[in-house]
Amino acid sequence: MHTPGDDALPVNTGPADTGPLDASAIDSEESRVEVYVTTDTSAAPHKADEARLYVMYDAANPEGNKLYFTEAEWEAFVLGVKDGEFDLDESGNLP
């Protein structure tokens, strides 16, 4: 299993105009998502032809499952976030 190392680049997942995310607003008991970029594709053999992968994982459980995105998939995901595709309603559900 690969964890962030020398080949990992941090990814600022916050909006570009607001600066870095405020980590103090997150309860330390809860899960929190972190992302890094790697050139090591050994943990995602189905994406081995990619030059780099964006790896999303739960920092509260770093040994748990990870999601691997190609650059195109990551760009589409970020655009969906910016477009409100994943925003929750008042009840905490996807509309």
Image (spheres, rainbow, N blue to C red):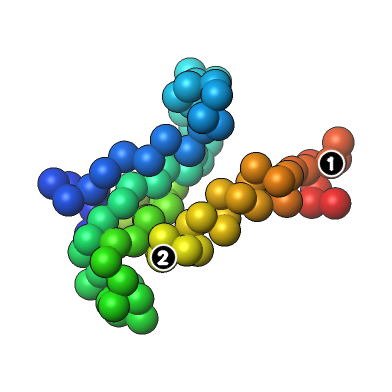
Task: Locate residue 57, reporting x and y percent.
Answer: 42, 51
Task: Locate residue 11, reporting x and y percent.
Answer: 38, 41
Q: Residue furthest bottom?
A: 46
Query: Which of the labelled discs sits on residue 43, or is there none?
Result: none
**Few, some or many C-alpha atoms within 10 Å of disc 1 (few <14, some 14-19, many ≥20)?**
few
Is residue 5 toward the left or the right of residue 88 in the image?
A: left
Q: Residue furthest left?
A: 6
Above-or-below relation of 10 to 65: above
**Few, some or many C-alpha atoms within 10 Å of disc 2 (few <14, some 14-19, many ≥20)?**
some
Task: Locate residue 76, reporting x and y percent.
Answer: 57, 58
Q: Which residue is at a point 41% across and 60% down the rendered structure image?
A: 71
Inspect the image, locate mark 2, and give the three-letter code of the amino acid beneath it: Thr
62 or 80: nearer the viewer: 80
Task: Locate residue 37, reporting x and y percent.
Answer: 31, 51
6 or 24: nearer the viewer: 6
Q: Which residue is at a point 65% across and 42% down the rendered structure image?
A: 82
Above-or-below relation of 95 to 67: above
Above-or-below relation of 12 to 75: above
42 or 24: nearer the viewer: 42
Q: Which residue is mark 2?
A: 70
Q: CA distance from mark 1 to mark 2?
A: 29 Å
- Kindly state the secondary structure of the residue where label 2 is placed: loop
The quarter of the picture where the N terminus appears is bottom left
For the residues bearing labels 1 and 2, Cβ distance under 8 angstroms? no
* Residue 43 seen anywhere in this rendered image of the structure: no
- Kindly state the secondary structure of the residue where label 1 is placed: loop
Q: Which residue is mark 1?
A: 89
Inspect the image, locate mark 1, and give the three-letter code of the amino acid beneath it: Asp
